[in-house]
Image: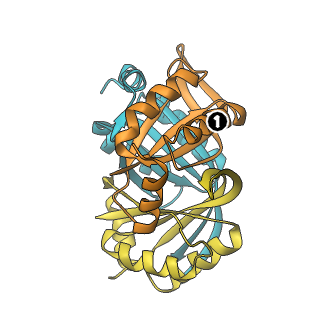
Chain colours: A yellow, B orange, C cyan
Amino acid sequence: MYYFIYITFPDEDSARKVARHLLENRLAACVNFWRINSMYWWEGEIQDDSEVAMIVKTRAEMYSKVREEVKRLHPYTTPCICAINVEEGNAEFLRWIDSIVEG
Amino acid sequence: MYYFIYITFPDEDSARKVARHLLENRLAACVNFWRINSMYWWEGEIQDDSEVAMIVKTRAEMYSKVREEVKRLHPYTTPCICAINVEEGNAEFLRWIDSIVEG
Amino acid sequence: MYYFIYITFPDEDSARKVARHLLENRLAACVNFWRINSMYWWEGEIQDDSEVAMIVKTRAEMYSKVREEVKRLHPYTTPCICAINVEEGNAEFLRWIDSIVEG
């Protein structure tokens, strides 16, 4: 079982910092990130901000470790750290994730 | 149960208009959107357009209300309004969605 | 059953080439793509590259055909070709996928 964990960050610097930490600790094999706009409720008003979205590619059983490390390093009090299931993948890519993320 | 509902729009204006409507009516806690390129079959030809992709973060049971509101406001006759399941999420983020989207 | 198949490419040219091939062969009804940054382990080092992410919208039973065609045309030895399940979608959009991707 493999997850794409979707996380948003205030900017590229905080995204890169968390990405590097997850990779260096073998909690993920790969991350992708890109600039987005966000609209959301906060403190009773609709906010409209630029952010960075990230997909963290890892084994599903690493989810709670990833969540705890992201929470520890993330500048938000309530970050979005949501796991999407990978239903099927090409075997060589999944084996590659296994070779990096040893659990 | 929580969904990321993936919707595409022709431009930022139509995306923002729908986003604001969903947020104001408490049908979503947060939306993310970004520019994309799209290639697709339409009227017998492969089209190649710029669009805006959006992820709407909400409770799964709000899906049909979100779908109906998006269809009502969306400029396309056949928009993409596809729900992806959130397999796991950090409790404080999911509780935050619950606090906004009361159902 | 419908999938969003997430694939990354080194650049827009390779993404467009694969997109056109999938569409022309009715293996997908629509693709979306956008520029991303990627960080990942490769050859013992953390790489940091720009890439292009793509979502291929198709029927779930086409996954293995899509995977094989993407592997054949893709410049990487280990591309990411990961399927995400569409939990719910608006009927007119799913019927439109069916009308293009006949299986």
Asked if residue B37 is positioned above or below residue B43 in the image, the reply reads below
- Residue matched to label 1: B15
Q: Nearer the viewer, residue B84 or C51?
A: B84
- Estimate the x, y position of residue B12 in percent, counting from the top left: 70, 37
Neighbourhood count class around disc 1 (C-alpha, 10 Å): few under 14, some 14–19, many 20 upward: many
Where is residue B48 shown, x and y percent of the image?
64, 29
Location of the C terminus of chain C (image quadrant): top left
Label count reads 1
> A64 and C17: which one is in front?
A64
Residue occupying the point 53% across, 68% down:
A78
Question: Secondary structure beneath disc 1?
Answer: helix
Does residue B60 show up? yes
User: Where B81 sits versus A73, above or below?
Assistant: above
Q: Quadrant of residue B17?
A: top right
Q: Residue at left 57%, top 75%? A: A19
Residue C8 spot, x, y in % from top left: 53, 54
Q: Chain of mark 1?
A: B
Q: Position of residue C37 (x, y in %)?
A: 64, 63
In this view, which residue lies farthest toward the front?
Answer: A44
Q: Amino acid at mark 1?
A: Ala
Q: Is residue A35 above or below residue A19?
A: above
